[in-house]
Image (cartoon, helix red, strand yellow):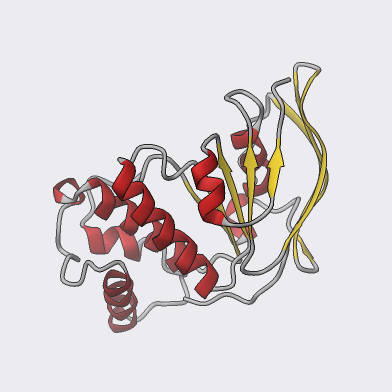
Amino acid sequence: MTSAAAPLRLSAVRIELAGRELVAPLTLDIAPGECVTVMGPSGCGKSTLLAFVAGTIEPAFRATGRVALGARDVSDLPPEARRIGILFQDDLLFPHLSVGDNLAFALAPRVRERRKRRAQVAQALVEADLAGFADRDPATLSGGQRARVALMRTLLSEPQALLLDEPFNKLDAQLRQDFRRFVFAHAAERALPVLLVTHDAADAQAAGGRVVALARP
């Protein structure tokens, strides 16, 4: 579950919608193990910026600039080839799959042996403090447990960078604090460059890195 450490580089990224600039040209280098937070009010383009980096931006937006992981330019690659993981406000667990099958869904195709797949899922559950939960229905989990499974599923895909789209937003205060620590610890352990978007200053403080402010257009 480790990734080759490389910086996430955004070069002159500019995004506009219907001729209105949402994100002014932005150049940003995020080192392995570093978390940079993008803050700003709703509608300022925070999530759209993440979508551009992930390769999922809607056609209605006009975006220019480049995205690279180390020396590898991923700007023209489809999302599944970029090796950039993303975590959203909603956990997006598949309701028709067990917890273990949700995790196994993210494993690379090269992990073919059932024994190895089950071992990686079991290890991810141990790291999430959910050992023995592989056969559970996701609907039986608490909000905090579902959030941890969602992160581990993202990490099982072996990303080389991690995007966080306000993933703490729907948790209550105590769970939010616990899940922040969980996310940032696992990202640091894997030396992942992290780009977090939020409107909550407490999230930025917990991330502990640089803050980039976007203004409402």
Nearer the observer, 183 or 59: 183
Residue drawn at (63%, 77%) of the image: 4
- Quarter of the image that includes the C terminus: top right
- Going by the image, does 140 lie left or right of 120? left
**Res 22 quadrant in image:** top right
Residue drawn at (29%, 79%) of the image: 114
Position of 31 relative to 195 (above/below): below
**Res 149 quadrant in image:** bottom left
- Residue 199 drawn at (x, y percent): 55, 34
Residue drawn at (55%, 55%) of the image: 207
Residue 157: in sight, yes or no? no
Q: How many marks?
A: 0
Residue drawn at (46%, 70%) of the image: 109
- Residue 24 drawn at (x, y percent): 82, 32
- Residue 187 drawn at (x, y percent): 51, 66
- Going by the image, does 108 lie left or right of 19? left
- Residue 96 drawn at (x, y percent): 22, 47
Position of 77 relative to 63 (above/below): below
Residue 182: in sight, yes or no? yes
